[in-house]
Amino acid sequence: MKKTIFLLFTIFASITFYQCGPKTDDKVAVGGYDVVSYYSTDGPVKGNETFTTDIDGKTYYFSNKESLEEFTNNPNKYIPQYGGYCAYAVAEKKIKMGVDPEVYEIRDGKLYLFYNSFFANKLNDWQEGDTKALQAKGDKNWEEIKNSK
């Protein structure tokens, strides 16, 4: 009986831990993905250390010179919302949560990134909710937490 209780406790503790998501202090933006590539029909691709630029303490990687130049000409178009943290977590929990760079949405011309694990795909939660309200809430919450660690 004790083993069963311990096993159940371990499972539930693991689920809770994984749903909290990773927090990242990584200085490489979006896990090294080329943020310009999110707007292409092929979707996101990994950037290359040869093509980089720094903005607001983050290093952005690009897959080629053209992407780097495109970003340099209009960085605000490509920088992810909420500092690249999970949009749903910022909106609903007012926390900075790491993301899976391949789980994203372009909405109203803006890049939103989301946490994803076996038990929790936050993009699905975002899309199932009132997205406009979540965006407004996320914008408000981000102003309050963007400078926190």
Image (tube, grey):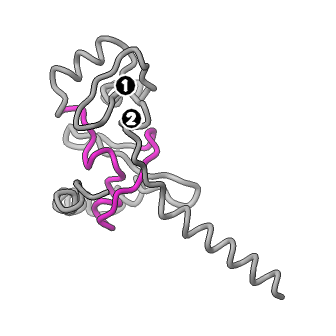
> Considering depth in this image, is 146 or 132 the residue closer to the camera?
146
Residue 39 is inside the magenta segment: no
Give the residue number, with chain letter if any, for mark 2. 28
Mark 2 and mark 1: Cα distance apart in space: 8 Å
Residue 61 image label: 1
> Considering depth in this image, is 56 or 77 the residue closer to the camera?
56
Residue 85 is inside the magenta segment: yes
At which x and y percent is residue 48? 43, 19
In the current view of this chain or complex, which residue is farthest to the top?
Answer: 65
Q: Residue at x 39, y 56 (%)?
A: 97
The C terminus lies in which quarter of the figure? bottom left
Please determine whether, in this image, residue 121 is positioned above or below residue 3: above
| Cβ–Cβ under 8 Å for marks 2 and 1 | yes
Please determine whether, in this image, residue 71 is positioned above or below residue 83: above
> Considering depth in this image, is 77 or 125 the residue closer to the camera?
77
Q: Residue at x 42, y 23 (%)?
A: 47
Q: Quadrant of residue 75?
A: top left
Q: Quadrant of residue 1?
A: bottom right
Crowding at mark 2 (Cα within 10 Å: few <14, some 14-19, many 20+) = some
Identify the element where label 2 is drawn.
loop
Of the image marks 2 and 1, the number of the one nearer the N terminus: 2
Amino acid at the residue labelled 1: Tyr
Residue 12 image label: none
At which x and y percent is residue 138? 23, 59
The residues colored magenta run: 77-103
Identify the element where label 1 is drawn.
strand
Q: Residue at x 33, y 21 (%)?
A: 52
Q: Is residue 87 left or right of residue 44?
A: left
In the current view of this chain or complex, which residue is farthest to the bottom?
Answer: 1
The number of numbered discs placed on residues in the rendered structure image is: 2
At which x and y percent is residue 104? 38, 43
Amino acid at the residue labelled 2: Val
